[in-house]
Amino acid sequence: MEHEDDRRGLLLAEQERIAARVTKLERDIAALTSARRSSVDDDEHDPDGEPLSARWSLLAGLLESARDDARQAAEAVRRLDAGAYGVCVACGQPIPAGQLDVRPFRERCVACTP
């Protein structure tokens, strides 16, 4: 039970960290979108700076990744609540604690990871 409480605490802390990252990236994208709308410069051909579209593309990719992490973390909490946390969803074998320490929302063991 104590070990489960520790895992729950880690997962919830990870969810908070990810949520903060998602919020920051959403704000950064909103600010960049606003800058793109108000910019009259041709930033695509500015040899001295990074094009706004390149920055937007990078931020959009990071946001997509963060949202995927948030989904995985929420699924890990659901597995914990269902008593299935730490069990590989593919083969049903236990996932070693060390692997869960590194990636708390891991759902597959190393052997079953594509």
Image: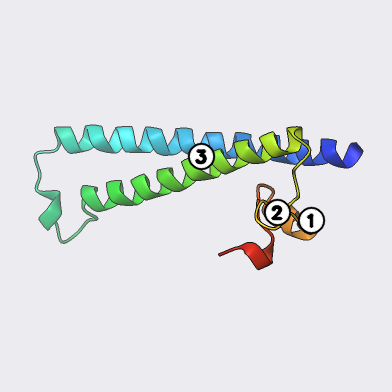
Residue to which mark 3 is pinned: 21
The disc, 2 or 3, on the residue closer to the chain's N-terminal end is: 3
For the residues labelled 1 and 3, the Cα–Cα distance comes to 30 Å
Q: Name the residue under label 1.
A: 94
Mark 2 or 3: in front is: 2
Residue at the image position 36 percent from the left and 46 percent from the top: 59
Q: Which residue is drawn at 83% across and 35% down?
A: 5
Q: Which of marks 1 and 2 is nearer the N terminus?
A: 2
Kind of residue at badge 1: Pro
Question: Which residue, given by chain and number where applicable, does mark 2 sit on?
Answer: 88
Q: Is residue 30 left or right of residue 64?
A: left
**Label 2: which secondary element:** loop
Which of the image's four quarters has the N terminus? top right
Report the front residue among 22 and 69: 69
- Does 38 sit above or below residue 48? above
Circle 1 SS class: loop
The amino acid beneath tag 3 is: Arg
Assess whether mark 2 and mark 1 are in contact (beta carbons under 8 angstroms): yes
Give how far apart the Cα atoms at labels 1 and 2 are.
6 Å
